[in-house]
Image (cartoon, helix red, strand yellow):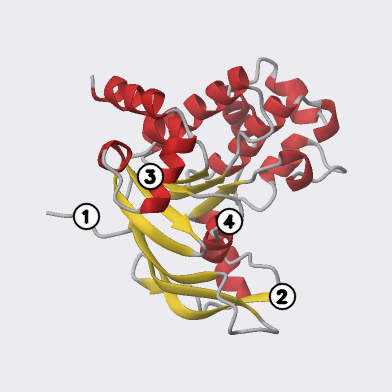
Amino acid sequence: MQQTPLLSVDNLVVTPRNDPSLRLVNDVSFQIRPGERVALVGESGSGKSLTCFSVMGLLDPALEVTGGDIVWQGRSTVGMTPAEHRRLLRTELSMVYQEPLTALNPLMNLGRQIREGVPGVRDEDVLRILSEVGMRDPQRVAKAMPHELSGGMRQRAMIAMAMIKQPRLLIADEPTTALDVTIEYQVLKLMYELTHRMNTALLFVTHDLGVVARLADRVLVMYLGEVVEEGETADVLSAPVHPYTKRLLAASSLATARTLVLEEED
């Protein structure tokens, strides 16, 4: 029997408040089931991040959802009050942002930031999650300010903040953009292992098809605000249908992407 979706995005439309005719996200639909890993792929400006911020209820005030619906476990989130949405974010949904230095509070140590907004978190819980994300000295890191950590450590701290509440869905908006290749691999491996162990679904935003091949069960391809192709990762990467998906693959290392798919199947 097929699992009931955790998240259903149905014909989502996002527009500027001062120009409702400009559809930045246009009629986007997809579902994510418990424990599933879905990649959202496309070039800059294709609507990937706006789709994620819509799901999180964190759209810029200049933008609004003007069509469609976002349904979390059978309940629409579009009409939720701010208090209801905050409760959902505290317990069910988490997000890892593209640049942790701008997402973290520069005036608050990491331990306090991890505890903030999550009921019942103790100091030992903070040290445990910091250890689980690979921090060698959790006590020192918990007392550190964001500027005292490297880029890779800051991103691990963001993952710790997102995963300490064991969310049902983690959204990762290009979280390895500013990292070198070695650290990128470590962070991706960490996210894969944590979400797998906690049975957390993952919506991963990226433009790197090699990452998609290694990480995702399914892939959604966005272009000009629309989902133009969707399917099992191996199928989309090996036999793309839409011309834009074909161009994306042509611009990437197609051989590498196929090799990574085969490695995951072994």
Of labels 3 and 4, earlier in sequence is 4
Residue carrying label 2: 62
Quarter of the image that includes the N terminus: bottom left
Nearest-to-viewer mark from 3 and 4: 3
Element assignment for label 1 = loop
Task: Please give the residue where the numbered disc 3 appears in the rendered image.
Answer: 246
* Amino acid tagged 2: Ala
Q: Quadrant of residue 46?
A: bottom right
Q: Is residue 262 above or below residue 75?
A: above
> Mark 3 or mark 1: which comes first in sequence?
1
Would residue 214 be visible to someone looking at this image? yes
Give the labeled residue for mark 4.
49
Q: Residue 110 at x, y = what percent?
A: 75, 36
Judge left or right: residue 215 versus residue 143: left
Callout in the foreground (3, 2): 3
Q: Name the amino acid, label 3.
A: Lys
Instruction: Locate the C terminus and report the quarter of the image it occupies.
Output: top left
Q: Tell me which numbered mark, 1 or 2, is placed earlier along the sequence.
A: 1
Q: Residues within 10 Å of mark 2 (few under 14, many from 20)?
A: few
What residue is drawn where x is 58% and y is 30%?
A: 129
Tell whether label 2 touches label 3 (CB within 8 Å).
no
Q: Residues within 10 Å of mark 3 (few under 14, many from 20)?
A: some
Q: Which mark is residue 3?
A: 1
